[in-house]
Amino acid sequence: MNIKELAKKLNLSITTVSRGLHNHLDVSQKTKEKIRKYAKKYNYKPNPFASGLASRNPNNLGIVIPLYGLNYSPLNHTSFIQFLSGMKNAMDEENIQFSMLLVKSEKEEMDAYKKLIIELKVKNIIIRDLAIKDKRIPLLKKHNINFIAWGRTQNLKNYAWVDLDNHQSMKIILEHLIKKNHKEIAFININKKFNFAYQRMEAYFDFLKEKNQKINKNYYFEIERNDPEISRDVIIKLLKKQKKITALICCTEYIAAGAIKACSKMNIKIGKDLSIITYDSLIVSNLIHPELTSISHPNDDLGYNAVRILMDKKLNIKDKNYLAKAEIIDRGSVLNI
């Protein structure tokens, strides 16, 4: 059924039916409910592409997915699949036209945002993997784009965001380790140009200081690229040089994969000789026994709320922030010493 036939059955104009389906204020609630009831009865669903072209103010949403740098490997997209699942639930509720572009370099990435804005006329955009100072935000503001960030920069003013509570999650990790009597705790981080990595580093040192724990700067190391082979080599060197380390925190699942490789090469038994805890271990934790203890975030919830906040034009900027809390999943890779 098309909108013309639906309007005829309702004895309403096509404009009224369209505006009712899109929840415009000039259509009464009673009429909206009647329109939705008939739309469901006759299995009518608006064509987002057609309505977008007709209104020139489309109910559309765009996202650019980098396949380089931090995200060069498919394993690094497991959390995004969860995020996308949450987005899908919210988009179904709003009848949203969705555009996704894939890029393989920083230049391609910036060109893709311009394509979304200028060629595809996308008015609503989600950005991810924010840097401490992110140049995409000025670009989107320049073109008056309604956007939301999955993550935060150091400057939190005047933009919407959803994010993991990186300070809280690191606190949970360290409390868990300290409770099990660990004092020699190392942290292998990804490059802190990414704001989530910067926040985790900041929380690592701040919480150790707060708890009067030993701070050894040699126990902290950054990996330039999210690669398990690089992580393995770094961790082997670290464990050979710093023999007192009893626990290792891995900032990403890839670093955790490198830690497993390092332990295997050095005949170190995880959960006995060395305790390991990681972030969002969706795949790697299942590859060994004991499985890796990890900190988990509700990525699908972040995706749902990103779309909900982005498309709700009534929200004030102060209400356009959502911080997801973490929880720890104890799988036995952390020894009580």
Image (spheres, rainbow, N blue to C red):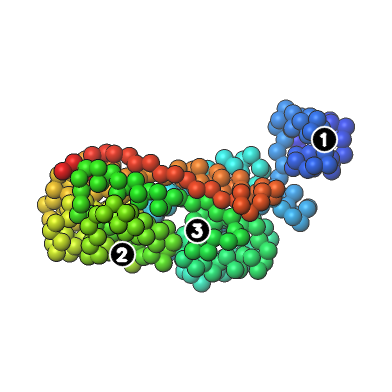
Q: Residue at x 13, y 51 (%)?
A: 268
Q: Where residue 267 sits: x, y (%)?
A: 11, 52
Q: Are marks 2 and 3 in contact (CB under 8 Å)?
A: no
Residue 96 visible in the shown view: yes
Task: Give the residue at mark 1.
Answer: 28
Q: Where residue 244 sits: x, y (%)?
A: 14, 56
- Of the residues shown, which amino acid type is indicated by label 2? Ile
Q: Is residue 83 above or below residue 137?
A: above
Task: Give the residue at mark 3.
Answer: 152
Which quarter of the figure has residue 34? top right
Sequence order check: which comes first, mark 1 or mark 2?
1
Sequence order check: which comes first, mark 3 or mark 1?
1
In this rendering, position of residue 303 left or right of residue 267: right
Q: Residue furthest bottom?
A: 107
Asked which secondary structure carries label 1, the reply is: loop
Q: Where residue 289 sits: x, y (%)?
A: 21, 41
Judge by depth and name the residue closer to the eye, 154 or 278. Answer: 154
- Of the residues shown, which amino acid type is indicated by label 3? Arg
Q: Residue at x 27, y 39 (%)?
A: 331
In the drawing, what numbered circle is on residue 223? 2
Q: Where residue 78 sits: x, y (%)?
A: 41, 49
